[in-house]
Amino acid sequence: MIRVLVVDDHPAVRAGLFSLLRSEPGIVAVAAVGTAAEALAESGRSRPDVVLLDYDLPDRDGLLLCCDLKALPEPPRVLLYSAFARPRLAPAARVAGVDAMLDKGAAPDELFETLRKVARGGLEQLPAPPDVIGRCVGELPPDDIPLFGMAMNGTPTAEIAAVAGDDLPATRSRLRALVKRLGTPRRAAPASDTGDSPPPRPRSV
């Protein structure tokens, strides 16, 4: 059984996802919460295999929450499930430790299959077009570019810390700052990245 924690700030979406997941063989929703603080507490209690994570939360955005989840003693895998799951967000998501992204418009069967792949660790790195990566590098201070490169290549945080000559908390803090710099909904879905106009910002994504 794949144990999934649902994190979404919209009560109706949260309840719908919880029911949907519980109806699928081999997947069990262990809990559904609406804030980052609740997600961290519940992750410690229920130890989910995968966190199905919204981007837009009231107390912290989903990428910063992913940073915190990945720092847990037994970190879960993270599937970012959001209307902002666009190529422009992929670099920040990779730095944060997101294992996969999926647009909320995906069909239920695609959601189930993606959850299974994430749980098995069978997904490739999040796709990020070269022009998107180039623009991200252009926004970074020179000292942070090596950290960005290592994180984009999936280098473990402890190894990044050793290469950078920092301790683990300091490295996590620097990576978190990179995520904050690179990952915002406003930047995540410009028309030039998606081939169409960006969607209007809903109350909850």
Image (cartoon, rainbow, N blue to C red):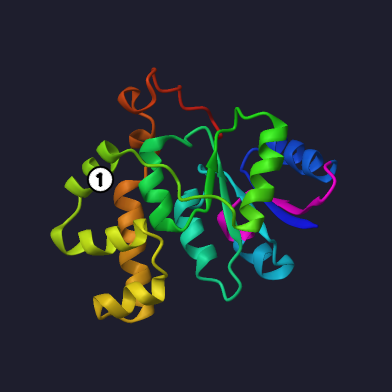
Q: Secondary structure at mark 1?
A: helix
Residue at 36% in and 48% down = 91
Query: In the figure, is residue 16 to the left or right of 115?
Result: right
Q: Is residue 34 magenta?
A: yes
Residue 73, located in which quarter of the rendered image?
A: bottom right
Residue placed under numbered mark 1 in the picture: 136
Tell me which corner region of the image, top left, top right, bottom left or bottom right, holds residue 105: top right
Residue 39 % position (x, y): 62, 58
User: Is residue 80 positioned above or below 1 on the image?
Assistant: above
Q: Looking at this view, is 103 or 38 the one in front?
A: 103
Q: What residue is drawn where x is 27% and y is 77%?
A: 163
Residue 62 spot, x, y in % from top left:
50, 49
Q: Is residue 139 magenta?
A: no
Q: Quadrant of the C terminus?
A: top right
Q: Which residue sits furthest left?
A: 142
What span is in magenta?
Answer: 24-39
Quadrant for residue 187, please give it.
Answer: top left
Q: Is residue 194 above or below residue 161?
A: above
User: Dot 1, how many residues are within 10 Å of its Cα: few (below 14), some (14-19), or many (20+)?
Assistant: some
